[in-house]
Image (cartoon, helix red, strand yellow):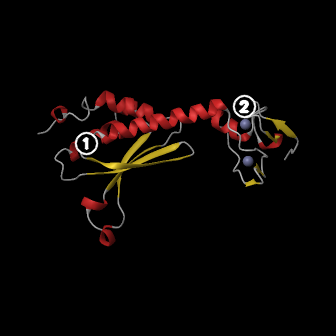
Amino acid sequence: MNKELSNCVECESDYYSGSSIMVGLCPECSYQIYDYENCEHEFKNDRCVKCYWNGNVSEYLKRKKKMDERAFKTLIEYLEKIPSIQKPIAFGDENGLWWLKFSLDIENKLAWNVVQELGCVINYISINERLPTVFYPVSPAPYMNGGPYDFLSWVIETKDIEFKPGTLKKWLEGRLPNPIDDLEQWNVE
Ligand SMILES: [Zn+2]
Ligand SMILES: [Zn+2]
């Protein structure tokens, strides 16, 4: 690898030119902005030994991260208002592939309506309008732990890092009862 130093125009850190596919951007910034492959950083003495990045983050990327986090929080706040969804909603993010996990109060008479509505929007709006998200149940081994009242959870996750939590919130708002916490708006048979 070319260990000649370049300076990143975004974060202003020096980096080994050979460690980045892009000219003028360190592997970290080219990943954050253009989704190119990142370096698997390994920090020693405040620098990555593989790409020489010093951990700097530009103001622009700091703002972008904050905005993404805010959108994530707004989605969680929205979901928390849905009848039968129990707080807290767990969440995480692996390289942009975000996920949420929560349980439903299965004694709430709207619980199955909620599963149905979420299943419709998140998994299957229509053949032509599939969102890159999935909604599915998960559980630890029931015989070792217990039944659905305490151990059944539901996961929402994206399969596409381009798909942001804020976009899912817009889809849900467009399709689910409005206002979301108004029980009258939910179709109960
Ligand atoms: Zn950079
Ligand atoms: Zn690195």
SS label for mark 2 = loop
Q: Quadrant of the C terminus?
A: top left
Three-letter code for the amino acid on which mark 1 is drawn: Val
Q: Is residue 158 left or right of residue 180?
A: right
User: Which residue position is annotated with label 1?
Assistant: 114
Residue at the image point whose x is 76% and y is 40% from the top: 20
Residue at the image point whose x is 30% and y is 58% from the top: 152
Q: Residue most toward the left?
A: 189
- Give the quarter of the image for residue 26: top right
Label 2 near ligand 1 (CB < 8 Å): yes
Q: Residue most toward the bottom?
A: 144
Residue at the image point whose x is 63% and y is 29% from the top: 60
Q: Is residue 185 left or right of residue 175?
A: left
Q: Is residue 142 left or right of residue 157?
A: left
Which sits earlier in the primary sequence, circle 1 or circle 2?
2
User: Which residue position is annotated with label 2?
Assistant: 10
| Mark-to-mark CA distance, 1 and 2 | 44 Å
Three-letter code for the amino acid on which mark 2 is drawn: Glu
Image coordinates of residue 144 in percent, x first then y, are: 33, 72
What crowding class fits label 1: few (fewer than 14 Cα within 10 Å), some (14-19), or many (20 or more)? some
10, above or below 85, in the image: above
- Give the quarter of the image for residue 57: top right
- Tag on residue 42? none
What crowding class fits label 2: few (fewer than 14 Cα within 10 Å), some (14-19), or many (20 or more)? some
Front of the two marks 1 and 2: 2
Image coordinates of residue 147 in percent, x first then y, are: 26, 64
Quadrant location of ligand 1? Answer: top right
